[in-house]
Image (cartoon, rainbow, N blue to C red):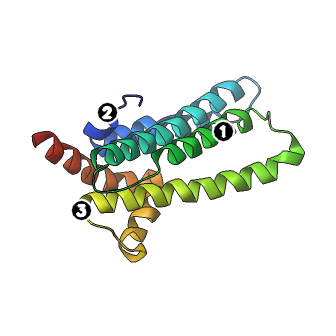
Amino acid sequence: MINFQFFLREPAWKIFWLGFLPVLAGSMLGASAQNIVVSQLSFLFGIFVELAWIYTVSNYLAHRYADRVDVPIQKLNAVLAIVAVYYLLAVPGMIPEQMGRPAFLLVVVLSFYYTYFLARLLVMAEKERNVTVKEYLPTAVMIFFWAIGIWFLQPRIRRIYSNLRLL
């Protein structure tokens, strides 16, 4: 497991700006010939911050609660790797046109999977029991809309991390 524990410790505003500022800056640069590479790299950096945050939180919770919860963490890691490879290829335009739509649809489905996975795991860690869809659906929506949801999710994650470090 790659150690990105600062995603567990840092306040929401730091993670928000680390993930959102590059995307915002890249979109403000525009798509002129001089700025296209910088714009693409800044967008990729922002996407990878979000994926690294999801990876870190999911793996931490899955390993921390492995005795109580059976979670297929290898499947989640594979899903996140596929999504990362898609963005690495799609942003610079390296995916052939005939594969673009199916690849995009696959990434959308995989995004719903990792959203479901992390939401369920986070609520299970907070409640320390199995949870229903009704209980983790609001958390899933916050994860899916990460730029807004991070402000509500990160304090919960920091609380779990700090409480478990004290044990």
Residue extending furthest toward the bottom: 134
Frontmost residue, 129 versus 52: 129
Indicate which label's residue lies in the foreground, 2 or 1.
2
Frontmost residue, 122 versus 35: 122
Which element type, helix, strand or loop, lies under badge 3? loop
Residue extending furthest toward the right: 98
Q: Amino acid at mark 2?
A: Gln
Residue at 31% from the left image edge and 33% from the top image edge: 5
Q: Tell me, for residue 87, which label it has, or none.
A: 1
Q: Contact (CB < 8 A) between labels 3 and 2?
A: no
Is the residue marked by circle 2 packed among few (<14), some (14-19), or many (20+) residues within 10 Å? few
Residue at 61% from the left image edge and 28% from the top image edge: 41
> Looking at the image, is mark 2 or mark 1 earlier in the sequence?
2
Compared with 5, 109 (above or below) is below
Is the residue marked by circle 3 packed among few (<14), some (14-19), or many (20+) residues within 10 Å? few
Q: Tell me, for residue 5, which label it has, or none.
A: 2
The residue singled out by tag 3 in the image is 128
Which element type, helix, strand or loop, lies under badge 1? helix
> Looking at the image, is mark 1 or mark 3 earlier in the sequence?
1
Q: Contact (CB < 8 A) between labels 2 and 1?
A: no
Compared with 1, 153 (above or below) is below
Q: Quadrant of the C terminus?
A: top left
Residue at 31% from the left image edge and 62% from the top image edge: 124
Q: Amino acid at mark 1?
A: Tyr
> Looking at the image, is mark 3 or mark 2 earlier in the sequence?
2
Is the residue marked by circle 1 packed among few (<14), some (14-19), or many (20+) residues within 10 Å? many
Q: Amino acid at mark 3?
A: Glu
Q: Quadrant of residue 112?
A: bottom right
Q: Tell me, for residue 16, which label it has, or none.
A: none
Residue at 45% from the left image edge and 51% from the top image edge: 147
Which element type, helix, strand or loop, lies under badge 2? loop
